[in-house]
Amino acid sequence: MLPWQLLNDRNPEDLRGKMEKDKWKKELAESYRSVTDLPGNFKLLKVEEDYFKTGNDRFRLSVPIDYFNLACSNEDDPIRRQFMPQIGEQVTTPWEINDPLGENPHKVTERLIHRYRDRALFLASDTCAMYCRHCFRRDYLSTNPSPLNRVEIENAAKYLRSHSEIKELIISGGDPLMLDDSRLEELLTAFRNSRPDIVFRIASRMPVVLPSRITDSLSNLLSIFKPLFFITQFNHPKELAKSSRQAVSILVNNGIPVFNQAVLLRSVNDSVDVLAELFQELLRSSVKPYYLFQGDLASGTHHLRVSIIRGLEIMKELRTRISGLAMPVYAVDLPGGGGKIPLTESYIQKITDTEIIFKDLSGKEYSYPVES
Ligand code: SF4
């Protein structure tokens, strides 16, 4: 058969489907990946210019064009602050560290972390479509750029097989949806075969930063591996653009529950009005606001953190404004491997001028700076 005959025989519906399916790869390839990629009319703010002047690009810039286009020129623009580095990133305060959640000591295979008895975390990818300036795994993402390989999948599957106390597997990264569908299928199949009973959680920011990644074929693939929950991270109502709402609805319409884990960020969403709108709009899109996280003590993120005291005030007022269904749990991952605790008064032992003392369920005390 001649090549033109092959082309003529191809079903146009199939071609359209394939183009739709691969649109995200094209958009990803076209992302802005350095300051020199940014459009000429995008004027750097002083705080951004000062960051690049240092010559120390601690955590690379990468932003898909559609997400970039949601931003404006204002220094306090909530979108811009999430993808553009500022001079504040060059500062590491005394309480900031590279592994703020204390995950490294709990690594049981190359990519599997087993910190809580009933849950494990698999780091499926070392890259993301966008590098969020507040990311607590920024050190990991800056130092471990290597593609996932079969041996790493097999080693994790083997560990899961011999640890029946693990009931849930969180597949994260980086962003696990940087893997294409066939790699994802290989991964999920290996884990499902090793543990038919395990519950999957896919943690991905793709619905927010590269919504074209959420295709019908991806959604169909994920739905084969139920029980499976999709966890995403919308931090501001502006991020709920039409394409992002559509991405979420593809999952929801396929019976995949979607939850949101927002991060409390200075000059992004540290306002009752912004958070009330965000959580109510998420509910309208059938996404349950699950957690609002206190920013972790990751190096170079001080300028984006909000104090816990302010966070508690915001939550108190939010409770009078929105329904229980729209309310997430305000939580902190205690520094030094203390784990996640809800930020309620019962966990707070003492507040001094400089620190807040928490007690975990075992009675152990942890200190968190007041001015974080
Ligand atoms: S998508 Fe997640 S892992 Fe990637 S940079 Fe953002 S917060 Fe970090």
Image: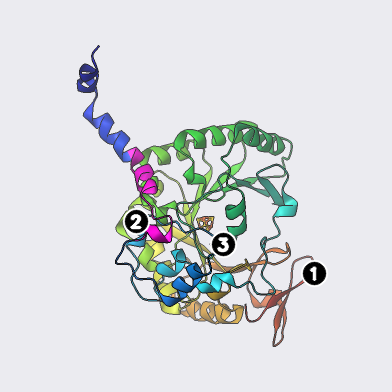
Question: Label 2 CB, ligand 1: below 8 Å?
Answer: no
Side of 324 relative to 196 (left or right)? left
Quick check: marks 2 and 3 in contact, CB under 8 Å? no
Side of 97 relative to 225 (left or right)? right
Q: Position of residue 30 (x, y in %)?
A: 35, 49
Estimate the spatial distance between the alpha carbons at disc 2 and disc 3, rounded to whole Å. 22 Å
Question: Label 1 CB, ligand 1: below 8 Å?
Answer: no
Q: For mark 2, give the secondary structure.
A: helix
Q: In this rendering, which labeled residue sits more in front, label 3 or label 1? A: 3
User: Farthest right residue?
Assistant: 363
- Let me know if residue 214 appears in the view: no
- Figure quadrant of residue 365: bottom right
Q: In this rendering, which labeled residue sits more in front, label 2 or label 3? A: 3
Q: Give the amino acid type for the residue marked by disc 3 in the picture.
A: Arg
Q: Position of residue 17 (x, y in %)?
A: 29, 35
Residue bearing the label numbered 2: 65
Q: Give the amino acid type for the residue marked by disc 2 in the picture.
A: Ile
From this view, report whether residue 302 is shown above or below residue 261: below
Q: Looking at the image, which residue is at 54% across and 74% down? A: 88
Side of 46 relative to 119 (left or right)? left
From this view, report whether residue 84 is shown above or below residue 110: below
Looking at the magenta stretch, what is its main secondary structure? helix
Residue bearing the label numbered 1: 363
Q: Position of residue 280 (x, y in %)?
A: 40, 68
- Let me know if residue 331 appears in the view: yes
Quick check: marks 1 and 2 in contact, CB under 8 Å? no
Residue bearing the label numbered 3: 58
Q: Earlier in the sequence, mark 1 or mark 2?
A: 2
